[in-house]
Amino acid sequence: MKPTIQEVTGMTRLSSIILRVALIIAVAISFVLTYLIMAHNTAFNRPQDVVNDNANAVQNSTVQSLGDVYLPIRVIYHDDVTEKLVYNRKNNLMANLQKRLAKWNMTTIGVVQKLDMKAYLARLNQKNSIMMIYPDRITWRLFADTFKQPSKLSETDFAFDRLIATPKGNRLTITFLNDDNQTIRETTMAGNYTDLTSLVRSADFTAQCKYVALNNTTQLLFTKAFTMNPYSYLVSYTPDNEFVNNLMSGSETSNIESKSSGGDTQYISGSQKLIVPKNGHLVTYQSYGQKEVKTMTAKLENSFETLKNGGISLRNIRYFGYDDNTDTVSFRNYVEGFPVFQQTDKGAAQITPGDSTGLLEALFANSNLQVPVPSDQAAVSVIPTEQVIDQMVQRGFKRKRIERIQLGYRWQMDKETDQVVDLLPTYYVRYYGQWQSFGTWLKTDLDTVSDTSPADQTSASGESNDADQASANTNSTAMGVR
């Protein structure tokens, strides 16, 4: 007797599920074995000239250095024709640019120059240039440490968002730019521009773009439609006892008190406290009696040390933003240069390193990206950014209230297993001081939106998702967008 269509369909779906589960198990086993090999092989080193993402796909969190986490996250290349965002899926483009620049010597940093918006945009969009972009401001001393330059080349530890390399004879001009106040500083460097262009031209992902002024701020617009791949990742969960051991290691285990409070579990030892929620994936660590950290460089450095001490996998985690008001440093997972949103309402980690009261507070996501797994999702077509603005205006939103637009990946747990997360390309828009996904804004009742009242929190899928807005608002003035 032949099977019915329903039976065939059911068997096909079951086979698909079994295949996916088998792949997940295989990847997990591969991850464990690779980790054990790397962890115990002291002879293992990264290639000296080209950093290959595949060769370094599995790393222990301690492998990541401060320089890795605070590298620029995007590269824009402008030849004499087009300006485009570039990325190399096979080789770590930004790491290779850093390695090349670190071999060349800079001269003394020039004096600060203030530009008007028109002149500033001209710098951002200049031809024959390679721009390396941080998600938010970084400091000169941290840059100098990462790019192996003497910090004494600048008298001040200035902040900037991006640097641009342009050819100048047989040397390079390096320009440091600060979006907040539209200032620049310039220096020269011994180096060959063609050595850099040979790296960026090897990119296997490009998206045409340009910078414009959007309500008195600089905004990156994607000028043509392009495709982005959705991804599926195996999720690693950090158990409570690992956070206790990693963050409260200075205390004897017998001196750590555990108690429940409102459904949450608290671990307390002296001036330290770890709070694990009953629901959700955000663990809070507090330590009192810390020295106040005063400079931005020290805050960024101390935040990295706390991040590393947390013990979460740093494989895909990068610096995301710095909040002037709270001195909070935030970190997110990144995939192919794009940040991941809606993982938690604070990203992957958010750290306030020693404020004026002596409190160090760190929030960690206990679920993070591990390794990619096969996905049957089709590539997504990303519309030009101007169409996002046009559709919102047609919907009734005011153009002058659209403050920022960011393209990233939306964290969405797989429907078949909690061991896998799907990452979906998504535009996010800051309107009237509130961040939400583009799809959510189009479903929002405009009568509920003002500069004082929060917008509707219903996500584009119709489900409540506070992270859609709250995770972005942790750095509301910048959101790590450059």
Image (cartoon, rainbow, N blue to C red):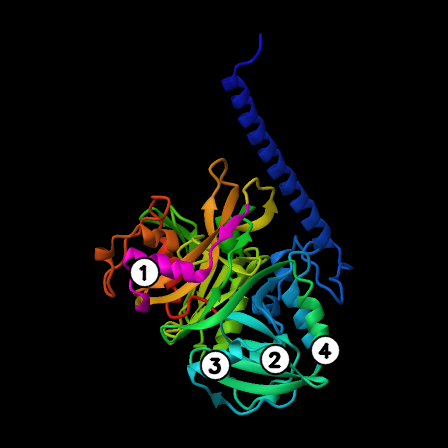
Estimate the spatial distance between the alpha carbons at disc 1 and disc 3, rounded to whole Å. 27 Å
Q: Quick one: SS at disc 2?
A: helix
Q: Quadrant of residue 3?
A: top right
Mark 2: give few (<14), some (14-19) or many (20+) Cα within 10 Å: some
Give the number of the disc on residue 103: 4
Q: On the picture, is 439 further left or further right than 97?
A: left
Asked if disc 4 and disc 3 are in contact, CB closer than 8 Å, the reply is no
Helix, strand or loop under label 4: loop
Q: Amino acid at mark 4?
A: Lys
Residue placed furthest toward the front = 81
Instruction: Point out the stretch of residues depicted in magenta.
Output: 379-400
**How far across and down, in percent of the image, does residue 369 sit?**
55, 51
Q: Circle 3 — which element?
A: helix
Of badges 4 and 3, the one in the foreground is 3
The Cα–Cα distance between marks 1 and 4, rounded to whole angstroms, is 49 Å
Do we see residue 367 in this rendering?
Answer: no
Mark 1: amino acid:
Val
Q: Amino acid at mark 3?
A: Tyr
User: Is the residue 22 above or below the residue 114 in the image?
Assistant: above
